[in-house]
Image (spheres, grey):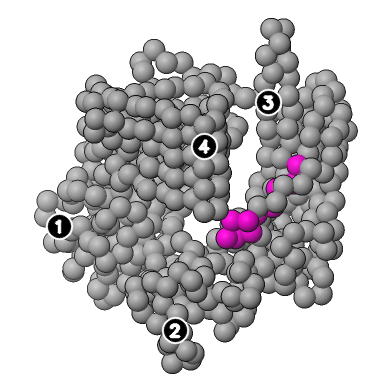
Amino acid sequence: AGDATIIFDSQEDFIEINTQQTLRFGDRNVFELTDGTDPTQVQFYSNTYDQIKIGTDTTFSGVITAPYGQIYAFSRTTINGNLIARSVWVDTDSTVHPIQNCTEFNTEFDDTDILEMRDALSFEGDGWTIADANSVADLTLSDNYTSDGESSLEITLNNEYDATIENATAIDAVFSEGASAVTVKLDVKSNAVPYTTCNGEVSVYLKAVDAATYTLAGTLPYDPSDEYSDFMDTLSFDLSSELADLVMNEKINVAIKVSANQNCNPVFWLDELQFCDDRDGCNIQLPTMNPPDWVAPDEDPYFYDVTWSGDNSDIIENAATLSGAIRVLEDTPTPCTVTAQFEAVLGERIDAILGDYICTPGVDISFNINASDLPFNTAGMISQANILVTTSFSNSSGTITTFNNIADMRYYHHNTDGTITHFTEEVFQDTYDGYWFKSDPAVNNRLPLLDEDSDVVGEIESVQEGVDLNGPDGPDTDTIADTETATIILE
């Protein structure tokens, strides 16, 4: 419903609303908290794979957790609280006031172990120790380099070749249902470069909590592409099937060894240890904390496989079209609607229905959009595209349920010759992450390409509030504090 005022008065208790599928909030609703109620005391949880809508002009206060779905806050919404989901979209002219601590789910839930696990994985607090009592290596918390939280772990080897650290905290990771493989990720920064000289390496060891000895899970060379970068590098490796089974089904302990040649005076910084499954679920995310008798619903059915042409390529250059195919996985012919969704970097969105079909098993539906017909058609503009396939079913009681299948995001920009270049989200992040840009006021949504040197102002790490963006190479009128200059910052 819309145009409603919803009053929450929890005093010292928590209000918890769990749904198995659909969760949505209408337009122009107001969430009113009384008698000192905090937004973290109003908790919504959904296992849906669909979109959770927060309607236009709504003032929402609370926390929504949807690990498998998408939360979409429509235009002119005000969010007082946190939105936690597989993907979160906030439309134009909206305001978000995040709450720093949303981990505690209710007053009766003892989350001590969870907080300790979070701090261990984020290298916060004093839980990590050097395993060898006779080691001369130094171990301390540091804010010199971080990728999450307020600190990383700094290890100075001094005159030793290696040092091993361990944490007595039991890691009880949360993974996606049906996951079968696990990747270990660890953010690392070190002065032990280049690898050919310093041989800097990081090894991860795992064991069950009740086991006597650790097993080597993997060793990674520290060989960054940019030795002088101020950012941490994410090192990763896949666990063996045996260790993946251990991590997903038992509580574990973790030990990490760093090593390098002594003549390099090596120092390592470690942050954000993650165990990620093959369905993009990582233990570093807030775990689901449901009532003891709560049973997770079956997964929403997966009716379609939506792919882009050239899906196996990270980037396709000089393409005349953006095209792809939809493979029907359902057993019976079903009416379906195919919608193309486009969004510019600064939030402008256009949806276009490509057609209504009878989706027939074994028959692919092809879609083909000419480059000239794609929106935001300005050379150099970066936009994102998605394909949504919607199907509705009516059960014996007449209840209609809608299911959405969505393609992986595809980014594109128009070339001066009328073609487009389209690429994956990974390419987009690898290309633009770590830089800040000066946009062209005449083209409000334009994100410059990195090969246009005049638009690449510098790296995010060097930005200070109120500091001139252009420096000696341009006028000194643009500052970070001046929002009217439309400076785009990517993180």
Residue under label 4, please give it. Answer: 28
Q: Amino acid at mark 2?
A: Thr
- Which mark is drawn over residue 402? 3
Q: Are marks 3 and 1 in contact (CB under 8 Å)?
A: no
Camera-side mark, 2 or 4: 4
Q: Amino acid at mark 4?
A: Arg
What is the C-alpha distance between the residues marked 2 and 1? 54 Å
Residue under label 2, please give it. Answer: 477
Q: Is residue 6 left or right of residue 208?
A: right
Q: Position of residue 350 (x, y in %)?
A: 70, 51
SS for callout 4: loop
Camera-side mark, 4 or 1: 4
SS for callout 1: loop
Q: Residue furthest left?
A: 134
Q: Would residue 71 be seen by someone viewing this image from the given angle?
A: no
Q: Are marks 4 and 3 in contact (CB under 8 Å)?
A: no
Whether residue 346 is in magenta: the answer is yes
- Residue at x 78%, y 39% (from the top left corner): 338
Q: Is residue 69 left or right of residue 242?
A: right
- Which mark is drawn over residue 135? 1
Bounds of the magenta segment: 339-348
Q: Would residue 442 be seen by someone viewing this image from the given angle?
A: yes
Q: Count residues near mark 1 (Cα–Cα under 10 Å), then give few for <14, some for 14-19, many for 20+.
A: some
Frontmost residue, 79 versus 383: 79
Camera-side mark, 4 or 3: 4
- Residue at x 39%, y 37% (from the top left corner): 61
Camera-side mark, 2 or 3: 2
Q: Which mark is first along the chain, 4 or 2? A: 4
